[in-house]
Image (tube, rainbow, N blue to C red):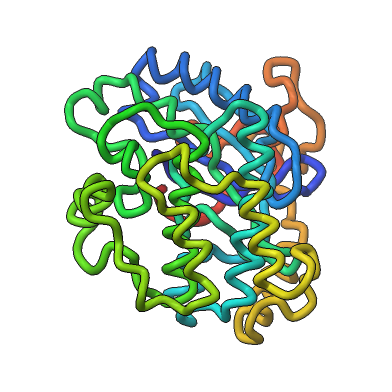
Amino acid sequence: MGTVYLSHTRGGQPVAFKVIRHEYGQDPDFRRRFEQEVRAARRVQGYHLVPVVDHDTTGPLPWIASAFVPGLTLADALTAHGPLPLPAVFQLVGCAALALGSIHAAEVVHRDLKPANILLGSTGPYVIDFGIARAADTTQLTHSGGVIGTPQYMSPEQALGEPVTAAADVFSLGLIAAVAATGRHPYGEGGATTLAVRIANTERMPPDLSAYPQPLRPLLERTLAADPSARITTDELAALSEAAAGRPLRSFDDWLPTPLTELIARREAAAARTPEPTPTATDGHWSTQPTATAPPRPATPPTPPPPHPARQTRPALLAGTT
């Protein structure tokens, strides 16, 4: 839905800054829904989620800014280092379930939970990008064949185009647990569309979970039920995960393998270095005060649109497109 940059507030706080794709930004229905959904997302408070700190729908391109966690995504961790140990998987799922509980309590459904939307940090996992996928549902782009969400991590009802509830996020988290623990998707191999078709047919052909580690199977069975009403709740999932992990969910000493812990530590050290301010285009001096024409905002728009001269830092590309 957009391109993500690393930017900073005037006080030096790092933020993840997403500029929405042009084709969405030009759709009035999207802008209206985006405003509604982001305002709802900003009400979400809780552990293990990355809060939205600001947004704008009035400029040439809509944008959304959230707190920056100097970790790495679960997707990157799996690609670079392979599956996680089972205790780490249970902690990840339990903490993500708590985050989803907070999201759902604010009447928001994530709708696009996937390994790329879970960050691994020294203080645990964090869920990001919640509450904005729904904004694209009524756009002409979607009506003309676009897909909102990630097909291989959709729930059956989402893959079938049916109404989506909080239970859809639980199904997605079950799929993530299976992949994080073994590197294998419960619906086998194939492209995203192939897996989405299999997921859509879960009621007729449920996934074979017999090859997964026995301690993981109860969690998979209770999250991957075809009927949304039969799936485990987020509170129950957190409790089940904590018991299976054998340690408190929020005990993060050595919770990840050493290579991941060291990589996260390096990213934390880099993020702690406050960038030098950028000179303004008008006088060549450091600008530390907002101007009368630009009220202060927590985040700095990247180009496009061009940054206002009062902003202190230039944004850098953080993670490509999402």
Foreground residue, 211 or 55? 211
Give the vertical position of 271 relative to 61 (above or below).
below
Report if residue 71 is visible in the image.
yes
Residue at the (42%, 75%) spot, across then down: 79
Instruction: Decide if residue 259 is on the left or right side of residue 151.
Output: right
In which quadrant is the N terminus drawn? Answer: top left
In the image, what residue occupies the spot 38% across and 41% down? 227
Q: Residue 136, how many percent across, how many down?
A: 37, 27
Find residue 268 and report its image quarter.
Answer: bottom right
Going by the image, does 7 lie left or right of 29? right
Residue occupying image coordinates x 45% and y 41%? 168
Residue for point 48% across, 74% down = 181
Question: Does residue 280 appear in this view?
Answer: no
x, y percent for residue 312? 71, 42
Going by the picture, which residue comes out furthest to the bottom?
258
In front here: 166 or 301?
166
Position of 304 relative to 182 (above/below): above
Q: Residue 117: horizontal and vertical position, in percent?
A: 51, 53
Residue 285 x, y percent position in the rendering: 76, 42
Camera-side residue: 215 or 81? 215
Along the viewing direction, whichever of 50 and 210 lies nearer the viewer:
210
Count of number-bearing discs: 0
